[in-house]
Image (cartoon, helix red, strand yellow):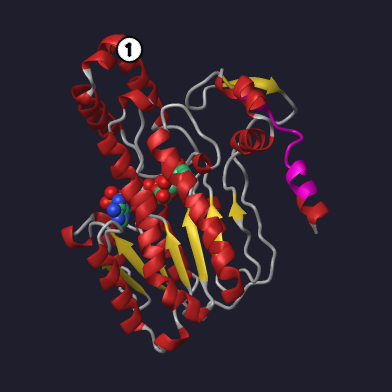
Amino acid sequence: MLAARLSRTLLQLPGKTLSISNGENATKRTLLFCSTSFTSIKHRTYTSEVDPVGSKAVLVTGCDSGFGFSLAKHLHSKGFLVFAGCLLKDKGDAGVKELDSLNSDRLRTIQLNVCNNEEVERAVEMVHSSLKDPEKGMWGLVNNAGISTFGEVEFTSMETYKEVAEVNLWGTVRTTKSFLPLLRRAKGRVVNISSMLGRMANPARSPYCITKFGVEAFSDCLRYEMYPLGVKVSVVEPGNFIAATSLYSPERIQAIAKKMWDELPEVVRKDYGRKYFDEKIAKMETYCNSGSTDTSSVIDAVTHALTATSPYTRYHPMDYYWWLRMQIMTHLPGAVSDMIYIH
Ligand SMILES: NC(=O)c1ccc[n+]([C@@H]2O[C@H](COP(=O)([O-])OP(=O)(O)OC[C@H]3O[C@@H](n4cnc5c(N)ncnc54)[C@H](OP(=O)(O)O)[C@@H]3O)[C@@H](O)[C@H]2O)c1
């Protein structure tokens, strides 16, 4: 089994272009060129036995847009009873309206800010009261809600570090803790959307990386604790899908940049200079259009984690470049990966 898994991942490598980065944000140089060009990972087909869905209840956070929005629709199409947590339901967000327009008993949007205790508790009550037999619990929780930002450590305010952690990390912990009694009753599933940046750090992404590393640690601890209780915990670590979701937009980058520059300590502003700062922002704007526009590998990974009899601990929907970089950064000595990717 182990040998088969190892050979499967290694077999994915021949015939691809392996590249190294010249530093920030995915600018690549070719390291090794083989016959096929560097492409996005194709749909990985998962083959393990699948539990029957049969209207099992699942809650997904952050369904206003991006992965969460697509997941809510996909899980509904698979037959799940879907509770789609939306940050802006009360404000009539377009994503919420589209989900509501499906007019299905099995897809219910709910107002859910994962940073707000009351809203999370209200969501638990709503799910509880909607279940046919609450004693049998609720099958799945997908912690998907997230935000991102950018900027070197010296450019990032403490307020920003806390703001990102409040959603990505503490939001995940809060929501999970609140739903665990229902999930334990069903011997169900927790699926946490982390990121490849939860496994390997990147310059200018520290506020995001530390939250996703935290999500990984939380998920591992929870997986160990829940194993004897029958709840299975998986982590999905998407690569770069920036072009496909609303995590970044040029407007958002400009707004972050303006606030960042205005709030920079004078010494940092003077030492780095406006030119350096503007170049970094321009790079970030280019990044907005990067990555895969096809999110189905992420959707398939979450679906497998929710439905397979033996879900994986970690899923890696990402292209070969990032997959290889992650293996090198997580398995080789830091000096080697620093030399290849960072310096
Ligand atoms: N896109 C990528 O390349 C990528 C890669 C790796 C991991 N991820 C992760 O994937 C997850 C989904 O992101 P995405 O790429 O699909 O971006 P997205 O389109 O921006 O989706 C994130 C969703 O979370 C919602 N949200 C933000 N703050 C919230 C809060 N306090 N409570 C509840 N919901 C909140 C957002 O609502 P609004 O739209 O109303 O703000 C949005 O609907 C995130 O955890 C992200 O870190 C994304």
> Foreground residue, 133 or 169?
169
Magenta segment range?
6-20
The image quarter in which residue 123 lies: bottom left
Residue 268 seen? yes
Residue 43 in the figure: left or right of residue 106: right
**Residue 201: % across, % down:** 51, 34
Residue 296 seen? no
Residue found at x 48% / y 57%: 192
Q: Is residue 42 magenta?
A: no
Quarter of the image where the C terminus is located: top right
Residue found at x 39% / y 45%: 245
Residue at label 1? Answer: 272
- Where 87 sits versus 130, above or below? above
- Disc 1 marks a residue whose amino acid type is Tyr
Quarter of the image where the N terminus is located: bottom right
> Foreground residue, 296 or 331?
331
- Where 121 sits versus 130, above or below? above
Residue found at x 31% / y 10%: 271
Disc 1 is placed on an element classified as helix
